[in-house]
C-alpha cells in the first residue's frame, strides 16, 4: 500500500473544514488586512477595499474579487465560539489552488463557481459560494471575473466541498 500524503479531505478522507487547503495541493496565497468592521468567515470570497493591501466582505456585485479566505490553523475562537478574521486581522487569501468551502446552495461537480453576494441558504455569509446548478450569473450571483473556479465535488446546500481556483487577474477598467 502506498503512503498517503494528503491533508484531511482527499479521496480517502472525509471533507475538511471551510477554508482548509485541500489535498496538499500547490497554492498561491496572498495576505491582506481586513479593513472592514465585518469579520470574515473562512472559505468565502473577499474583495479589494480602498487602501492598498486591504480587503473586506463582499457588499455589491461590482466589488473587485481578490480570492477565497483560507483557514489559519492557529486562529482562536471568539467568545461566541466563532472563528473569523476580525477587523485589522491579516487575512490569507487563496488565488490559486484547491480549498474546502461551505456551499451556499446545492452544487454539482464541474459546476462553475458563482459568488452569492448576500449569501445563500446553506451558507449565509456574504460572499459565500454557489454554482451554476442553482441558476445563471446575474444580479446577486456573480461569475468571478479573472478567475477560473470550478466545483470539484457534488455537495448539498450547507455541505463542505472542494473548489479549484485559478486566477488569471483582473484590473479596474474605468477611471
Image (spheres, rainbow, N blue to C red):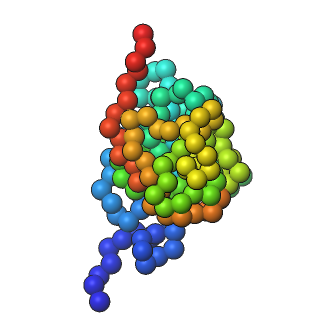
- Nearest the eye: 37 or 3: 3
* Side (left or right) of 171 relative to 56: left
Residue 47 shows in the view: yes
User: Residue drawn 40% across and 18% down?
Assistant: 173
> Does the image show residue 84?
no
Residue at the location (40% across, 20% down)?
Answer: 172
Give the quadrant of the N terminus.
bottom left
- Counting from the top left corner in percent of width and height, residue 52 is at 41, 23
Residue 25 pos. (x, y %): 33, 60
Residue 32 location, x and y as percent?
A: 43, 35
- Out of 79 and 15, give the one closest to the viewer: 15
At 58% from the left and 42% from the top, the residue drawn is: 136
Q: Quadrant of residue 160?
A: bottom right
Where is residue 145 shown, x and y percent of the image? Answer: 43, 34
- Between 154 and 36, the residue placed more toward the observer is 154
> At x 56% / y 39%, what residue is drawn?
137
Q: Is residue 152 above or below residue 137?
A: below
Amino acid at each position: 500500500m502506498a503512503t498517503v500524503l494528503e491533508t484531511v479531505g482527499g479521496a480517502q478522507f472525509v471533507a475538511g473544514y471551510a477554508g482548509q487547503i485541500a489535498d496538499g495541493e500547490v497554492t498561491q496565497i496572498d495576505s491582506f488586512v481586513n479593513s472592514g468592521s465585518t469579520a470574515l468567515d473562512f472559505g468565502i470570497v473577499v474583495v479589494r477595499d480602498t487602501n492598498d493591501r486591504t480587503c473586506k466582505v463582499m457588499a455589491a456585485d461590482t466589488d473587485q474579487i481578490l480570492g477565497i479566505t483560507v483557514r489559519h490553523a492557529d486562529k482562536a475562537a471568539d467568545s461566541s465560539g466563532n472563528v473569523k478574521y476580525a477587523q485589522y486581522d491579516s487575512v490569507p487569501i487563496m488565488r490559486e489552488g484547491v480549498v474546502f468551502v461551505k456551499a451556499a446552495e446545492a452544487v454539482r461537480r464541474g459546476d462553475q463557481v458563482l459568488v452569492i453576494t448576500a449569501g445563500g441558504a446553506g451558507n449565509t455569509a456574504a460572499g459565500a459560494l454557489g454554482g451554476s446548478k442553482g441558476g445563471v450569473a446575474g444580479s446577486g450571483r456573480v461569475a468571478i471575473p479573472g478567475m477560473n473556479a470550478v466545483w470539484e465535488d457534488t455537495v448539498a446546500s450547507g455541505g463542505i466541498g472542494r473548489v479549484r481556483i485559478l486566477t488569471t487577474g483582473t484590473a479596474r477598467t474605468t477611471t
